Image: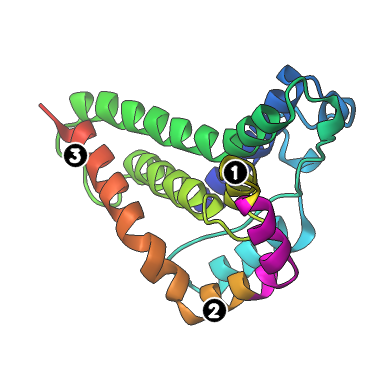
Amino acid sequence: MTAYLVLLFSLSVHESAHAWTALQEGDPTAQSLGRISLNPLVHIDLIGTVVLPLLMIFTGVTWLFGWAKPTPVNPRYFKDLKRGQIIVSGAGPTSNLMLAVLFTAALFLALRVVPEPSSDNPLFRLLVMGIQLNVVLAIFNLVPLPPLDGSHILQWALPNGLGHRFVRMIGPYGGFILLALVMTGALWTLIGPVVDVIVESLIALARFQ
């Protein structure tokens, strides 16, 4: 259940980051709906935030995953359309990487107090879990498949309309492709090595004497 609380917090930070960044770019839509908040109740998606994670917990799955309700954005308010689209889309994954760094800093400090904690120490398990989960959320959301943040970044970052053409072509099938990648384990094959390198580097940094 600790993992679930970390997930709720991390998803709330992710969606709040989208909402807050959209406001900085001129769009008050998410703010007006109360989405700049760490209260998970305003971000809950029934399937992604409740059913799937709890099902994974109660069936004994060794890892945890989920998603929140997408943050509404109206790009017509953006001061600069291209910049706004890229920055707002990137804010969610960036916030998760920042959270992973904060958990790393907390782990660093905790290890100064207890240099050799037991493997079942709840505090250290929570901190390591915070690092792992936030790195997974960040890298997963950067996958360039609709409806993930990575597809929006790609759509606006590629020159000569290439990103727009790619998203139009793959958009109707993005969800199905993503589901197939998750169900077959192919997604983890693709992003797992990147996640492992980042997580191991952060934990090694926390343990650095």
Q: Which residue lies under the disc numbered 3? A: 204
Which residue is rendered at x = 65% and y = 66% of the image? 52
Q: Which residues are magenta?
A: 162-176
Label 2 crowding class (10 Å Cα cut-off): few <14, some 14-19, many 20+? few
Residue 168: give x, y in percent of width and height.
73, 61
Could you tell me which quadrant the C terminus lies in?
top left
Q: Is residue 183 left or right of residue 132?
A: right
Q: Quadrant of the N terminus?
A: bottom right
Q: Which residue is mark 2?
A: 183
Query: Which mark, residue 153?
Result: 1
Among the two numbered marks 1 and 3 on one chain, the one whose residue lies closer to the N terminus: 1
Q: Residue furthest bottom?
A: 184
User: Based on the displayed image, in which of its 4 quarters is residue 171 positioned?
Assistant: bottom right
Distance between mark 1 and mark 2 Cα atoms: 25 Å
Secondary structure category for the residue under label 2: helix
Q: Exactly how many numbered labels are in the figure?
A: 3
Mark 1 vs mark 3, CA separation in Å:
30 Å
**Main secondary structure type of the part rendered in magenta:** helix
Which one is nearer the viewer's eye here, 95 or 5? 95
Question: Residue 77: x, y in percent?
Answer: 85, 25
Gap in Å between the C-alphas at discs 2 and 3?
31 Å
Q: Amino acid at mark 2?
A: Met
> Measuring 55% from the left and 66% from the top, which residue is drawn there?
57
Marks 1 & 2, CB-CB < 8 Å contact: no
For discs 1 and 3, the disc positioned in front in the rendered view: 1
